[in-house]
Image (tube, rainbow, N blue to C red):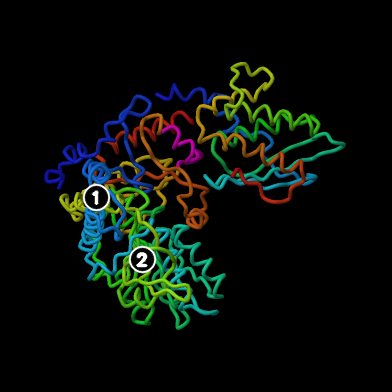
Amino acid sequence: MFDELRDLYQEVVFDHNRNPRNFRVMEDATRKIDGFNPLCGDRITLYVKVHDNVIEDVSFQGSGCAISTASASLMTEIVRGHTEEETHEIFELFHRIVTGEDSRTNFDELGKLAVLAGVRAYPARVKCATLAWHSLEAALKEDAETVSTE
Amino acid sequence: MIATFDVARIRQDFPILGETIHGKPLIYLDNAASTQKPKAVLDTLLHVYEHDYANVHRGVHTLSQRATDLFEGAREKIRAFINARDIKEIIFVRGTTEAVNLVAQSYGRSSLQAGDEILITAMEHHSNIVPWQMLCQQTGAVLKVAPINLAGEIIMEEFEALLTERTKLVSVVHMSNALGTINPVKRIVEIAHAKGVPVMLDGAQAIPHMPVDVQALDCDFYAFSGHKLCGPSGIGVLYGKEALLKAMPPWQGGGDMIRMVTFAKSEYNTLPYKFEAGTPAIAEAIGLGAAVDYLQTIGMDKVAAYEQLLLDYATQKALEIPALKIIGIANDKGAILSFTLHHIHPHDIGTMLDQLGIAVRAGHHCAMPVMDFFGVPATARASFSFYNTVEEVDVLIDGIKQIIEVFG
């Protein structure tokens, strides 16, 4: 019945929604930020540990839809070990693809994140997929304010 | 009841109900956000623009007179619809939000002082919270909030206790958009009036679902939006008792709200025009008049009874789903089913139901404090209208069951 939605709700998304990775408080985080999507009320608290410009660990807490939870979960796995600049580049690429700005259909560069590419067919859900990323961007800029997707 | 309510025939009046979404027949259950428009309203809008359109209250030419007559005719229809005493008490505004802002900025600003209190409830829409917070910042008045219980009803003892000699205005939602609760507004008005406090009612959700008689309610202000009442968007109504409106200063200045202007001073127009600066939403007001005519051919008491039946059926079916939790279980409740599903976020519910052709709202419903109270980030909300059917409820319930299965 929901076959048409398979592009959006892939098995990996369900898996990360059910068992989000790095879903924990990080006591020794070097940066912590609250993200908020005022449209739907989704909230995320992101913990980041950066050392010598390298992201050593990322974790999160909060409540959100399957797309936003899976996106946050995947993000914490993917950015670990990358420099801040590399992380920014991954975000830029991811953002272009989920907003449809980059219309390619080959997502090799995105790795696991490719499972979220289907979001671009659902403009109302793009913000769900990018909330965690916007929060991470803000955390890396050490922007202390609560970030909003608006 | 169903026998006397010919919903199949009524549905033919709404062209949009023939749409398909993702290949499925549209099931429109987002009526609390906005209702669909019957052909009578659509035809009226087109007819106005094709035959009767000009600016109102201005020209000596025939077309301006014709537009004015239709525009003022709509005002009279709305007066009769809510049983106001006089057309002077019917102010056209953009919608409920603007009506609340008008009362806050005109009545509130001219009569409230530092330390005075405005009393609202914990189930208000943001539009009945923020204008008062702005007024409090401007005047030093204090916003008081009467609490609600877990069923989503105002705790009346607490409400009464918060009504003191400092209270200068009460503003309460007639029917909650997030919970469906129908508040005992007649009783609220009585209690407040006993202490000499005027009452504003936010009728945005109530007026599409039940007969409203402002004289019987004895409220001082009543606000509603046209677009939730099968009318066009961009038009709404503020009802106010004449004596209050008369004493209030204008809110916005401009054309139409004045009688005489010199650079030294201006003399304001009489009611209702004093509060209608600028060219109004002419065709929309006339369209709202047509919507009111249409609803009266059906009868608001019949609408209320039929929708109650739909709600009872939907509630009963929803209760059979163990993972489903209904948010808002007031005794007196309008046709709104706000719910959460264990472990499935409302946004995911919304996207999946949409795939089945079902339009529901997923989110905080512009009532974040209500969501906080119930400890949920959001709910999914199916809100019914008289053109919905029992069969549509069945498709909704079946859809919810499928979602639970897919999410595992």
Residue shown at 46% from the left, 78% from the top: B111
Q: Chain of mark 2?
A: B
Q: State the predominant SS element of the stretch in magenta.
A: helix
For the record, the magenta segment spans: B341-353
Please identify the quarter of the rendering in which residue B153 is found: bottom left
Circle 2 or circle 1, nearest the eye:
1
- Which amino acid does the dot numbered 1 rest on? Ala
Q: Chain of mark 1?
A: B
Closest to the observer, B13 or B40: B40
Give the SS element for disc 2. strand
Instruction: Name the disc covering residue B291, or none.
Output: 1
Please identify the quarter of the rendering in which residue A137 is found: top right
Give the SS element for disc 1. helix
| Residue B309 visible somewhere in the drawing | yes
Residue shown at 29% from the left, 51% from the top: B54
- Which amino acid does the dot numbered 2 rest on? Leu
Q: Residues within 10 Å of mark 2 (few under 14, many from 20)?
A: many
Q: Which residue is identified by label 2?
A: B201
Residue B277 at what x, y percent from top left? 39, 63
Q: Work out how far the residue at label 2 is from the one at label 1, CA to CA, in angstroms.
A: 21 Å
Instruction: Name the disc covering residue B268, or none.
Output: none
Residue shown at 37% from the left, 67% from the top: B257
Residue found at the far left of this picture: B4
Left or right: B143, with A61 as reference point: left
Please identify the quarter of the rendering in which residue B318 is found: top left
Q: Is residue A69 above or below residue B161?
A: above
Q: Is residue B297 above or below residue A112?
A: below
Magenta span contains residue B228: no
